[in-house]
Amino acid sequence: MGVGRICADGFRVRQFFMRDYGEEPSLLWALARHLEDFDVLITYNGKTYDQPLLETRYRMARAQTPFGRLAHLDLLHGARRLWKLRFDSCRLVDLENQILGVEREGDLPGEMIPYVYFEYLRTQQAFRVVPIFHHNATDILTTACLTGIVPFAFREPGAARFAHGSELVGLARWFLKAERREQALELMRRAVRMGLPDDLLFRTLWDTALLERKLGNEPAALEIWTELAEGRNPYRVMALEALAKYYEHRARNYSLALEMIRSARALADSDDLARRQARIERRLAKPRTGRLL
């Protein structure tokens, strides 16, 4: 197990290692003593993997776990919000390469660590575990570097340096889930201006239009729906229906509403669209009464 910390003279990593199974209680005790100096634990996937595993080992050793009093920030969840729309993988080693620009050479794959450790136990040849120490130290250093990026992006999205519009979209969705609509809308607008791949662009435009309408900016929503309705994309039919609803209920322009519905039905018909068309046609057929002066 390894723990990294920022000291006056730089970043330090301390690793705890048991030379045999009998040393596990001593290792757990040493780790607990070391963590007494800390208030916050920062990990990458630690809430799902590392901490539950270690808590189990402490219980089996009938020792008190040191994690109960520590606040825990798991960077994996924030990293996925930022980068899952941009990269196929958000594994720590992949982000290390894609975000930090570091390429590991000669690194021991994580899935090989148990095999190498068991080989060490069998042979008692210490040199076999050197790659494990190196792998762990690199993981901890990468986690420290991402700690300077991920929390800052959520705390100060306006000041964070984003390289790709998809990062802004991921962050916007988080703000939207947190009911911070104005911030989500601004991030989506920035993402569209930065440029997005087509599939993500169309989804973001649709989400932006819905937010614009909810926040009372109907002209902006209409502009986006019109743009989506004019070209081939997965949201074209929904945009035409949204325009039809606006022209029917808000603008009272039934002829234009009927035109939107007919265009939508020509692309993908449904019972709802058919009922809406029938209702609009009844309204158009209804004679208008003049006013007596």
Image: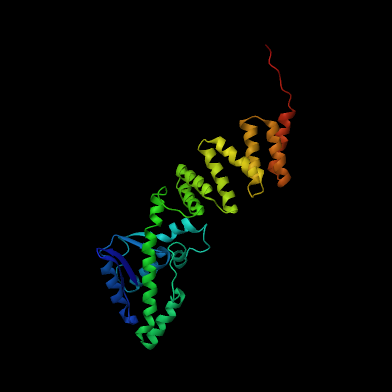
Quadrant assignment, res 16: bottom left
Q: Where's residue 257, x and y in %?
A: 68, 35
Residue 56 in sight in this render: no
The residue lying at 63 percent from left, 40 percent from top is 226
Quadrant assignment, res 34: bottom left
> As displayed, is residue 212 above or below residue 144?
above
Q: Where's residue 214, x and y in %?
A: 52, 39
The residue lying at 48 percent from left, 51 percent from top is 168
Q: What is the quadrant of the N terminus in the image?
A: bottom left
Residue 93 in sight in this render: yes
Quadrant assignment, res 25: bottom left
Q: Where's residue 186, x and y in %?
A: 47, 44
Q: What is the quadrant of the C terminus in the image?
A: top right
Q: How is the image coloured?
A: rainbow
Q: Nearer the viewer, residue 63 or 116?
A: 116
The residue lying at 59 percent from left, 53 percent from top is 199
Count of marks placed on residues:
0
Quick check: 72 left or right of 230?
Answer: left
